[in-house]
Image: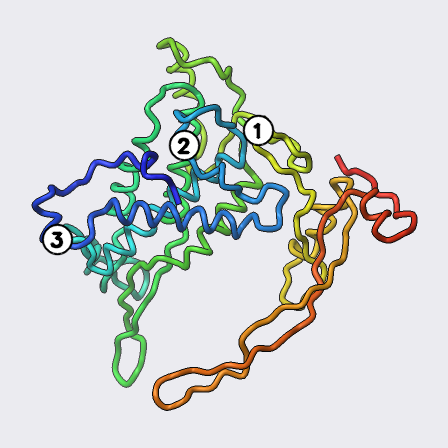
Amino acid sequence: MLPPRHLRVCPIVSGAEQGTHHSPPDLSVAAGAQSGIEECKFQFAWDRWNCPERALQLSSHGGLRSANRETAFVHAISSAGVMYTLTRNCSLGDFDNCGCDDSRNGQLGGQGWLWGGCSDNVGFGEAISKQFVDALETGQDARAAMNLHNNEAGRKAVKGTMKRTCKCHGVSGSCTTQTCWLQLPEFREVGTYLKERYHKALKVDLLQGAGNSAASRGAIAETFSSISKKELVHLEDSPDYCLENKTLGLLGTEGRECLKRGKALSKWEKRSCRRLCGDCGLAVEERRAEMVSSCNCKFHWCCAVRCEQCRKRVTKYFCVRKEKRERSSGGAGRKLKRKL
């Protein structure tokens, strides 16, 4: 979760009002930022860069920060998480100053349907998210412009994945007309959408030192204004995440777990051993372990659930150095080519 010092918030209700109102927005901001980071960890669980803890600090004022495509994703998914949570909590009635978006109710939306019902109020979520998250960027250089652009891309992702839900009206169950409203999708859909944008992220070539003069700020603003707000942007190339780099705080992929078998695995997950180990010049080591879990649980009146402890042998796979793999297996290891 983002440390409190990086949530430099300005409550939009007074202390007296907070005593009588529901949860203030800053609680939703913190929860939303956390949900964004959790989604980041899910989306990159089997990538060489797996959204490590050091990526959670959004403000660039706490020290040197990279400006690569991974940083772009962190900004976008965190901003999206804040907007999503604010919008959802608004619909749940957590804020006294917010409710359904019925601004278009009664208007013709398309052939055979009208706007109606209770649309999720993304306008509220967007405005408050922008107020809280964008306030972290006080600079006027290229990096600040990049961060603000990616914050906006995250908010666009929430709006772009909204779902239209409709209810039929008519005699005897017919669907003569429909009333429709907009609902938030599952946040996983937002994360998947932004992961696709991450793979297509646009590199912007600007001088990193630019930004101190009015001319430089104008050039930066002009460059970013020409890029679609839906796109993720970055200024720097990503480092080699295969390798440990203490200066950058990177752990490398040695020791990482990977996946090889499983009916429910995606193609990306099934290729994780090659991506994390083989393509990084590492071998795959198979380890067997015993897992203990609750099983055969039964409800007993009243009121307890009693379970047995079941033991299961599982096989896991890890990335290890080739020489370590050769020593542990007692033989010559297979040569592994590094894919650059």
Measuring from the top left, give residue 133's x and y in whole percent. Answer: 32, 37
- Residue 248 image label: 1
Count how many numbered circles sit on residues in the image.
Answer: 3
- N-terminal label among 1 and 2: 2
Specify the quadrant of the image occupied by residue 58: top left
Q: Reply above or below: 70 against 122.
A: above
- Residue 21 image label: 3
Q: Residue furthest right?
A: 332
Indicate the amino acid at tag 2: His
Residue sitting at 51 percent across and 29 percent down? 234
Q: CA distance from mark 2 to mark 3?
A: 33 Å
Element under disc 3: loop
Nearer the camera: disc 1 or disc 3: 1
Q: Quadrant of the N terminus?
A: top left
Specify the quadrant of the image occupied by residue 295: bottom right
The residue to which callout 2 is attached is 149
Residue sitting at 30 percent across and 31 percent down? 135
Relative horizontal placement of residue 22, taking residue 192 as reference (left or right): left
Relative horizontal placement of residue 286, taking residue 175 as reference (left or right): right
Q: CA distance from mark 1 to mark 2?
A: 24 Å
